[in-house]
Amino acid sequence: MAAIELKGVAKSFGTVAVIHGIDLAVEHGEFVVFVGPSGCGKSTLLRMICGLEPITSGTLAIGGKPMRGVPPAKRGVAMVFQNYALYPHMTVAENMGFSLLMERVPKKEREARVRRAAETLQLGELLSRKPKELSGGQRQRVAIGRAIVRDPQVFLFDEPLSNLDAELRVQMRLELAKLHRTLGATMIYVTHDQTEAMTLADRIVVLRSGIIEQIGTPLEIYASPRNRFVAGFMGSPKMSFLATRIAKTSGRKLSLAVEGMSPATVEIELAPAMTVPDEVTIGIRPEHFRLAGSPGPRLEVRIDFVERLGGDSYLHAPDHPAGSLIIRQDDPRLVQPGSKPTSVGVDWRQVHLFAGDGRAIEVRRQTRVSQGEIA
């Protein structure tokens, strides 16, 4: 297996730039997930690593060896696509071993490598079947097995689970996590699904419009987003953003008034490196709202829709004066949709603050809430 290093990697199609000077180092044996909205450049970046798209500028190295101009077959990578692309007239064993056949690998070695991959993916009893006799999850495992038999330095996955139903996606996420532990391979995985990113990745690379917005572990990305885009994109359901007013400043201390909240102010002290912003937005995850037993000021919300997911339910209040809110409740019997306003508290220690330009505001001390209007 091998590390991957990109320095100043850019890609343009004619005069249109789609990747803007990416710098990224993927460690040996690491599972890295590229995530971002459609059109952010994640699949293009993956194809550049694989060699299916030429690099416009910058350098790419795999295992310390420069890859500019090296054809895909010579890079020591194997790619698994969204489409399984299995040969319908071949058996599972023939599909998995086809690339080895093209490389003129001796038959005994070819069969041994196919058997080992099949055992790893629990396909041993299916080797004689044709693709039409397999389920979607089994076909995807065959596509992964076809990559494994090549014994590549790097595995690349381009949204491999997007064609599967919800139950199979969960099953295949578990299979991929176990496969990574078993092989200890370097893997790069592209998805727009935050759940896949959070559950599979050692590190997540959040992309937008061809640039990297943030790199970090799943917990770092979720708990300490660098800007409002990352905060809003990572998390399901997404973070709620409350419009606030800077009611008072005193040195590095700000007093914020939240529209639609019972009379109170939110007081914060900025970290030394932070400049005093002109605007502030408060971000709150659904799990940090409190329906009952929360001290301090509360928000009066009108619930329009309840999204019931078994053990949890999510309350949607799109018309709150401060912004659209999504609130998690553990007991689906507590609140029902209707015209009666509901009082909702907030764990103010868990809120996120963002300046007008979207950057995260670093706070020196925990947020403090004071009852009553600002003098």
Image (cartoon, rainbow, N blue to C red):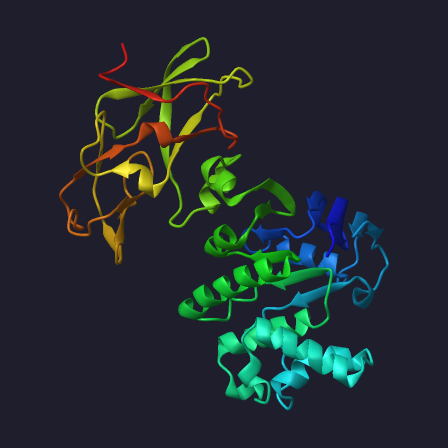
**Quadrant the N terminus occupies:** bottom right
Horizontally, residue 326 falls left or right of residue 83, namely: left
Is 144 located above or below residue 335 in the figure?
Answer: below
Horizontally, residue 112 falls left or right of residue 261, namely: right
Q: Nearer the viewer, residue 145 or 56?
A: 145
Q: Going 44% across and 70% down the picture, which residue do you hit?
A: 168
**Quadrant the C terminus occupies:** top left
Question: In the current view of this chain or complex, which residue is farthest to the left?
Answer: 340
Residue 181 is situated, as x and y percent measured from the top left of the image, at 58, 58
Q: Going 47% across and 46% down the picture, which residue do you hit?
A: 234
Q: Nearer the viewer, residue 367 or 233?
A: 367
Q: Nearer the viewer, residue 268 or 264?
A: 268
Residue 90 is situated, as x and y percent measured from the top left of the image, at 65, 89
Counting the numbered discs, the total is 0
Q: Nearer the viewer, residue 42 or 167?
A: 167
Q: Going 51% across and 83% down the picture, which residue do you hit?
A: 134
Residue 279 is situated, as x and y percent measured from the top left of the image, at 45, 24
Confirm whether residue 254 shows in the render: yes
Confirm whether residue 229 shows in the render: no
Q: Going 84% across and 52% down the picture, which residue do you hit?
A: 65
Horizontally, residue 172 falls left or right of residue 306, namely: right
Q: Quadrant of residue 368?
A: top left
Residue 336 is situated, as x and y percent measured from the top left of the image, at 16, 50
Is 267 located above or below residue 227 in the figure?
Answer: above
